[in-house]
Image (tube, rainbow, N blue to C red):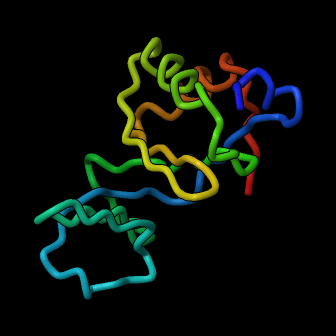
Amino acid sequence: MKLAEFKEKAQLGYYIRDGEYFVHNEDDADRLSPMIFALIRDGGEITVIEKLPEGSSQADAMKLITFTPDLPSDLVGFLLQVAKALAKEGVPIFVMSSMSTDHLLVQTKYIEKVRKALKGAGLEESYS
């Protein structure tokens, strides 16, 4: 499905999840915390995306952005549109996809640039 076709049927948006997240490698995949958002096993490496505990901080903390509504698996061009808008603002991104939608991690210091870029790309922020 082409992006323009999908936009005729649905209002694209996103929300920024509460809290901050960090990315790290994990040697022990059995250490599953309820704070873990995603695990990516890539050959000999395990990447963990985990929510920072409340009250803690980390210099490279990130915000997790989830796109709405659920995106069709045959949608073409959505991430390209998002990536171009964020690149124009100088925002580095960490991209993940699931069966139903896409997610971005961006450093917390860039969050206002993210809002500006996504609004400019026609996405509305919601609060879920």
Q: Nearer the viewer, residue 126 or 38?
A: 38
Q: Residue at x 85, y 37 (%)?
A: 10
Check the image and report above or below for 4 versus 114. Answer: above
Identify whether 68 is placed above or below 43. Answer: above
Q: Is residue 34 left or right of residue 4?
A: left
- Of residues 111 and 39, the one nearer the viewer is 39
Q: Is residue 15 above or below residue 55?
A: above
Q: Position of residue 15 (x, y in %)?
A: 66, 47
Work out whether 35 lies above or below 75. Answer: below
The quadrant of the image that shows the C terminus is bottom right
Closer to the camera in the image, 35 or 56? 35
Q: Is residue 86 left or right of residue 49?
A: right
> For the point 52% across and 48% down, which residue is it?
103
Q: Quadrant for the N terminus, please.
A: top right
Please name the residue shown 40% across and 72% down the image: 36
Residue ranking furthest to the bottom? 30
- Residue 7 in percent (x, y) is at 80, 28
Percent position of residue 92, x then y: 35, 29
The residue closer to the viewer here, 74 or 87, is 74
Q: What is the quadrant of residue 52 in the picture?
A: bottom left
Residue, x 58% and y 25% (percent of image)? 77
Number of numbered tags placed on the structure image: 0
